[in-house]
Image: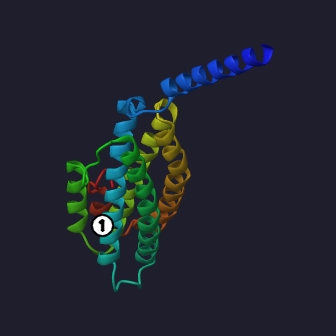
Amino acid sequence: MVRKMIILVAVAVTAMGGTAVATVSPSPQTVTQQDKDFLVQAHQSNLTEIESSKAALEKTAGQQDQKATRIVRKLAKHFIKDHKKLDKAVRRVSDQLGVKLPDTPNTEQRKQLDQLSALSGAEFDRAWISAELHGHHETLAAVEQEIENGSSPEVKKLATVAKPVVQEHIDLLLKAERVSTPSPSESPSLSESPSPSES
């Protein structure tokens, strides 16, 4: 009789446990607007960084004599590799959570890419570094916001993994900016001209 009672209790606990697990299992409904916005923003930022860096490689082809140009080429190759890897993770998580991603950068990012493509030489180098710095600072702010306010563990993990990568890019860009800063003898119009605000 005691043995039969133990078996019945075990069956009941198992059944209740199964029900409890079913009610708390993750679902697409656990993804908040904050999480969705972060995934979209991260994806578009990655697309922009990759396209901008490819443009840098094309613009600086055959201009190896300038130190700033060599640095831009090196950074561009590094950024393409990192942002492709980050975007692969963003797309994977978005697919898992049912979040639809856009196919292209947003309108403002497209405009900034067009502005960069109109430049060349040292002017391009400085504008590219400035645009990349601004874009990476915005990305870092979005990453920190997701880490603090996001709800989806998967999306928060993406942000946590991305943070040191984005910070490393900022550090490299700050060093590059010091190298590319024009001397006082150069035309002030280059340093004063507006540069793209996001990359």
Which one is nearer the viewer's eye here, 178 or 133? 133
- Give the image location of residue 152, x and y in percent: 47, 35
Considering the image in quadrants, where does the N terminus appear? top right
* Quarter holding residue 191: bottom left
Residue beneath the point at 53% across and 52% down: 167
Residue pointed to by mark 1: 187
Query: Neighbour class for label 1 at 10 Å: few (<14), some, many (≥20)?
Result: few
Residue 67 is left or right of residue 63, and the answer is right
- Give the image location of residue 192, x and y in percent: 30, 56
Residue beneath the point at 31% across and 58% down: 48
140, above or below 18, in the image:
below
Residue 38 is left or right of residue 15, and the answer is left
Q: How is the image coloured?
A: rainbow
Considering the image in quadrants, where does the C terminus appear? bottom left
Residue 95 is left or right of residue 22, and the answer is left
Q: Secondary structure at mark 1?
A: loop
Number of dots carrying numbers:
1
Residue beneath the point at 37% across and 69% down: 185
Which one is nearer the viewer's eye here, 188 or 29? 29
49, above or below 96, in the image:
below
Extreme residue toward the right, this view: 2
* Quarter holding residue 116: bottom left
- Give the image location of residue 166, x and y in percent: 49, 53
Residue type at numbered disc 1: Ser
Residue beneath the point at 27% across and 61% down: 189
- Give the image location of residue 16, x and y in percent: 58, 20
79, above or below 194, in the image:
below
* Quarter holding residue 194: bottom left
